[in-house]
Image: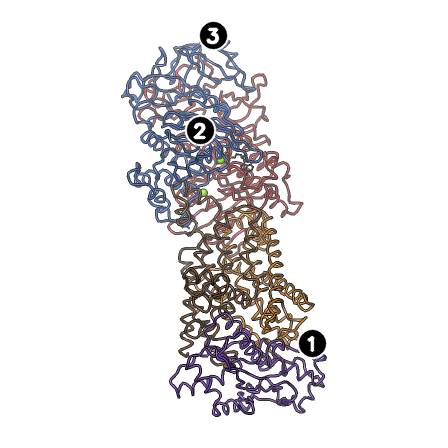
Chain colours: A blue, B red, C brown, D orange, E purple
Amino acid sequence: MSLKVDLTLSRGEFRLQAAFAVNEPGITAVFGPSGCGKTTLLRAIAGLERAARGTVRVDGEIWQDGDRRQPVHRRALGFVFQEASLFEHLSVHDNLRYGWCRLPAQERRIELEEIIDLLGLEPLLQRHPRGLSGGERQRVAIGRALATSPRLLLMDEPLAALDAARKAEILPYLERLHRHLKMPVLHVTHSTDEVARLADRVLLMEQGGIVHHGPVEELLPIISGEAGEPASLLRGRVVGHHAEDGLLEIAVGPLRLLVPSGPLPKGAELRLRIPARDVSIALDAEAASSILNRLPARVRAIEPESDATCLVRLEVAGQELLARITRRSVRELGLSKGKAAVAQVMSVVLEGIQEGESAAKRSRCDC
Amino acid sequence: MSLKVDLTLSRGEFRLQAAFAVNEPGITAVFGPSGCGKTTLLRAIAGLERAARGTVRVDGEIWQDGDRRQPVHRRALGFVFQEASLFEHLSVHDNLRYGWCRLPAQERRIELEEIIDLLGLEPLLQRHPRGLSGGERQRVAIGRALATSPRLLLMDEPLAALDAARKAEILPYLERLHRHLKMPVLHVTHSTDEVARLADRVLLMEQGGIVHHGPVEELLPIISGEAGEPASLLRGRVVGHHAEDGLLEIAVGPLRLLVPSGPLPKGAELRLRIPARDVSIALDAEAASSILNRLPARVRAIEPESDATCLVRLEVAGQELLARITRRSVRELGLSKGKAAVAQVMSVVLEGIQEGESAAKRSRCDC
Amino acid sequence: MSEADLQALLITLQLAGVTTVILLLIGTPLAWWLAHARGRWLPAVEALVSLPLILPPTVVGFYLLVALAPQGPVGRVVEALGGPRLAFSFAGMVIGSVIYSLPFVVQPLQNAFRAIGPRPLEVAATLRAGPVDRFLSVALPLARHGFLTATVLGFAHTVGEFGVVLMIGGNIPGETQVLSIAIYDHVEALDYASAHKLSAGLLLLSFLVLLLLQRAGRSGGTRS
Amino acid sequence: MSEADLQALLITLQLAGVTTVILLLIGTPLAWWLAHARGRWLPAVEALVSLPLILPPTVVGFYLLVALAPQGPVGRVVEALGGPRLAFSFAGMVIGSVIYSLPFVVQPLQNAFRAIGPRPLEVAATLRAGPVDRFLSVALPLARHGFLTATVLGFAHTVGEFGVVLMIGGNIPGETQVLSIAIYDHVEALDYASAHKLSAGLLLLSFLVLLLLQRAGRSGGTRS
Amino acid sequence: AVASNFLPVARLLAHSFEAETGHRVKLVPGATGRLYAQIVRGAPFDLFLAADRVRPQRLEREGRIVPGSRRTYALGRLVLWSPDPQRIRDGSGILRRGDFHRLAIANPRFAPYGRAAREVLERLGQWQALAPRLVRGENIAQAFHFVQSGNAELGFIAAAQWQALPAARRGSAWPVPANLHEPIEQQMVLLSPRPAARAFHAWLLRPESRTLVRRSGYEVPADE
Ligand SMILES: Nc1ncnc2c1ncn2[C@@H]1O[C@H](COP(=O)(O)OP(=O)(O)OP(=O)(O)O)[C@@H](O)[C@H]1O
Ligand SMILES: Nc1ncnc2c1ncn2[C@@H]1O[C@H](COP(=O)(O)OP(=O)(O)OP(=O)(O)O)[C@@H](O)[C@H]1O
Ligand SMILES: [Mg+2]
Ligand SMILES: [Mg+2]
């Protein structure tokens, strides 16, 4: 359940230099601009880049250290390549079985049928890869990698060619799977949405180096800010559930938030992701509106963002909450540093549920 | 500036049957689940599917009609394939020049340098495709297709492997380009965001058939509803611009909305896309908050959506506006059919600017 | 068809069969190595493999005869080790044919291996396939067309070859007389009728064998 | 090296060069067609192309001699059209070599074309390249390795071939005597010293030519 | 082992020998030079019927034969032949006039009939003049093919070959007088002391055999 990587590699002008360690299971999103070395990093960890020097350890097992190197096929990993790369000479079914067959029976922790079901591959089984659509190929590639019950899963933009509905089906399964199998996952993606929904940690890369590595709470504001969508993460705890309204009551410090969700165990720790654009500011706490969550707040800072908008940093129960509002509103409401106000929160994404297998519950909720 | 397609094709169990016409320039998003035939449709239009029967007309020129068929290379189209498919034996620069060179000089309406600049290909020019990252390959493929100054642009998920920053750079350029060159574009995508930002029309496919075809205003609610993100579109007209706040004033019927935006010509017709989750409902029109746009509305219908939420259909200035709020809010506010209320609009996406070249202005605006 | 001709036919098929099998066994690893090795001297090795082609077969046969003869460098060693006589024997003909047809097997295989590219093998490695397993389960099937060509060229060339085989085998009826030599003899003896008959028969038979090979290679599905 | 040998060398190089060029010119479209055609009788055509290999060269030469004779089916037509005498001429040798080496050129090319797959050609078509243009600018460079192999095998086989050339050429010194025949003559005349010298020279020269070919083929960049 | 040109006669002789004695004779035809090279390297031949005197002499000198077994079994005769009945009317006159395109001979360097043909031309003083028009077969059989197929208008062939032709196709011919060239002595040697081989050796020298040889178009030595 641990992954320790310290690798360097030079190729032309490009130089990869990556050292990081992951000590819990969970999904680490690898995020960064095109060409920053995400694919190269994954390949180097898998042992596919012969020029890579350094160490790779998984669960205390040494995959690479100096001149000692486990060959790729001895590393219990699953790799989903950026292009699906199916075996053109095998049917879909044989592609799926390829790795599965090579696994000693006692190491098979995922049933082939389960994968086929979940990824909706049943109707494709007898087909040949060259007749598949882009998304179909990618689903087969994911299934093929999962079928080896890997100890480390490396996925290079596996969902890029999938439609939203498919994604919505596959994402929770991936989460459940990695939690169940307790395997670390490195997941390359360009979508902050995917990061927010899926990741426990983020590895932020730039020009071959790792510029940030940390829990998603810390890094999401940075990466979503870069993507033009600043957001904040609040820590909270489940207080109770209002079954009649389908609302979960969450305590953030002394405050209470109501978030659409199924029941969760009392006391469970949660992260609440709140996009800055879904926070508005009012002066009067008592106005009747459909916005359930109205939190007393204090203005920490007001940062101009564009010609028309500002980013307001609010303090809410000792934590920071970002709100994006227009400059005109700032003026009309007379907002300034230190002023008390009410933060109206229109949507919350529940993240990183620490207990309970029901990661599927984690979802965006409009309150 | 017109495209008329009526094609059928059978392949194994899959059957494509697609008839549609596009009479203005602009971007038509081709949307639908994986395997529904989007790639096949584009290939058939390009003439790459020999088994396709029917007609294809572009600008009155007959590309295919019964047995008469223009060969692919006589069709002035640009095709971005789902996998980048660069020529492995040519450098990036030669890949870009391949189509460009084959175009008579007087037909070249886009400069190669412009494409290279915009897509950031300068540092890659001397490289060979096999050393490129996934996103780099895709950018080259887009540039190569554009370099032929096509009369019809067919793009099969061209942006799937790009990071958000790149996308944000390329999208406005694509918009500008197609408006400038007045060429119709068919753009396959799985992202409703891309549809909303980019498309003028949507072609919604399912199992080889076209289930809907219409302006994005009509279809966005459907496809974003399917993707779990309902939204509404309002028609409006530019009234003026408040330079000091960077806000555009837009009339929707008798009502006025303020939307962050650069100035636009007075009288210009606009579409305003408003995600249902960004609309909240209040009873009192006068509460002071950062939400600038508070529109008098009347409840048309309340539809339960999930355990916790409802979709409320509001009538605003004679048009329909969707709001997603919690069941508890419905109860607390005492909302019911026919009741008057105030719709608080937190974000507006300006769409389909009819005049003026500045499509780049079209953007999501948080108000 | 005379009895001698029939015997020659059997020996020919036997020789071509054995030679083709050995060629594939030797040529496959060699081609694999050539397709993946790097280095300045690689072209030299590639050129070397093609060299047997350059000399006329009778001359190659002559040199092989010199080498394989009981007093020759190779023959002496083999006989010292208790090996069989190579000159004027079936074994000797096989050796000669293998050397002479090697390039026809190595070159197509090498190209086929190269055309696969590294990706499928990388994928196989991540799916727990070891090097031999990868080779058998991925490289071989993907190089199917190359194997077909190698087999066809190797087989056909061995059937038609006669200079080397004549020299090493000694044209002994029922032992080392192959069909190509028999036809040649008929022509030399101005016995045109027999030559025509035998040629036609050989062509027909070979055509059928080649046809079967092509069919077999195709049935695996075309990569196109 | 005697003057006759030198002449033989020049004729050999000329013959191998011209033959290789013609082989590529004929073999390329044929291979292209074979790589893309569909149909039940395709394997038959493929088998047919390999057939010249099956007969011993001298026998092929004999039949060609009959066909090219002034009264023969081909010779008659050629002479009626005012063409040159083919037997015992350089032109005749070229015809013979081309027929006999055709499979070595067609097969590697066919595989190379097949390995390209349809995608690059489709892309080229959407970039306004017509069929010939596509072929020249995409298929040819991507089939580079196949061309290299075809050239090497075709060239080497023509240099080494001697049965067909001997029959059709008539071994006229300075006209149709090629090096392989010269070496053969030395061996037959028990002039082993000359045979060794000439063989060594031929091998060295061919090695250099092959080396250059490999280098040239490689410099285009390896697809790996 | 038997020189190819003598094969048809050797077959007849072997048949009668087999019928008479019950021994089995395996005939291995081939070019004399090649058979010599193979014998030197241990080819399992018992009796060697060469087409000349040189190779048997060498074998004798090298001590590879049963002492005293070198005997002349036939004397070859040359015929200048053209399939065209009108062409050769005045014997050697046509050679002096030179009104033809190609003259076929066996290779004078190592083929005995070729050497004889060269001597004829030299004695007639035409060697220099006709040299460029000569086409040379590897052996006398190929010289025959050249003429018979119509590619060479005329050529020096063995009298035995001419006699074997059906009368209708004998065209015109000039039997070359024996004094124009050294006698073409075809000698044989015993290579093993096996009784059956000795028996066949002796059989060939019987008067009945010599008659058959003479009827086939050879001379036989005056007496033994
Ligand atoms: N053979 C090579 N020579 C030079 N540079 C190379 C070579 N191969 C890869 N690179 C460069 O290495 C960098 C990292 O590539 P990599 O594929 O890891 O990027 P990435 O982060 O996966 O990008 P993307 O999101 O576009 O897939 C790129 O800039 C690429 O151009
Ligand atoms: N040769 C074939 N035989 C049978 N079915 C085929 C063949 N080729 C394609 N199909 C099927 O045709 C359908 C349409 O494929 P297409 O590639 O057009 O889908 P798509 O809409 O582009 O999907 P994606 O979003 O995954 O790229 C798919 O279901 C595919 O499986
Ligand atoms: Mg990548
Ligand atoms: Mg597709």
Q: Which mark is residue A339?
A: 3
Pick whichever, B298 or B265, lies toward us: B265
Q: Nearer the viewer, mark 2 or mark 1?
A: 1
Q: Nearer the viewer, mark 3 or mark 1?
A: 1
Question: Type of residue at label 3?
Answer: Lys
Q: Residue B290: x, y in percent? A: 47, 15
The kind of secondary structure element at disc 2 is: strand
Subunit bearing disc 2: A
Question: Type of residue at label 2?
Answer: Val
Q: Specify whether tag 1 is near ligand 1 (CB below 8 Å).
A: no
Task: Point out the image quarter for the N terminus of chain B.
Answer: top right
The kind of secondary structure element at disc 3 is: loop
The answer to whether marks 2 and 3 mark residues whose Cβ atoms lie closer than 8 Å is: no
Q: Is residue B232 visible?
A: no
Q: Which residue is mark 1?
A: E132
What residue sits 68% from the left and 67% below the top? D2
Label 2 and label 1 in one chain: no
Label 3 and label 1 in one chain: no
Dot 1: few (<14), some (14–19), or many (≥20) neighbours within 10 Å?
A: some
Q: Specify whether tag 2 is near ligand 1 (CB below 8 Å).
A: no
Q: Residue B64: x, y in percent? A: 52, 52
Tell me the CA gap for discs 3 and 1: 116 Å
Up/down of E81 relative to D77, above or below: below
Q: Which residue is mark 2?
A: A5
The numbered mark, 2 or 3, whose residue comes first in the sequence reads 2
Question: Type of residue at label 1?
Answer: Pro
Up/down of A144 relative to B48, above or below: above
Q: Nearer the viewer, mark 2 or mark 3?
A: 2
Subunit bearing disc 1: E
* D149 left or right, relative to C208: right
The kind of secondary structure element at disc 1 is: helix
Tell me the CA gap for discs 2 and 3: 47 Å
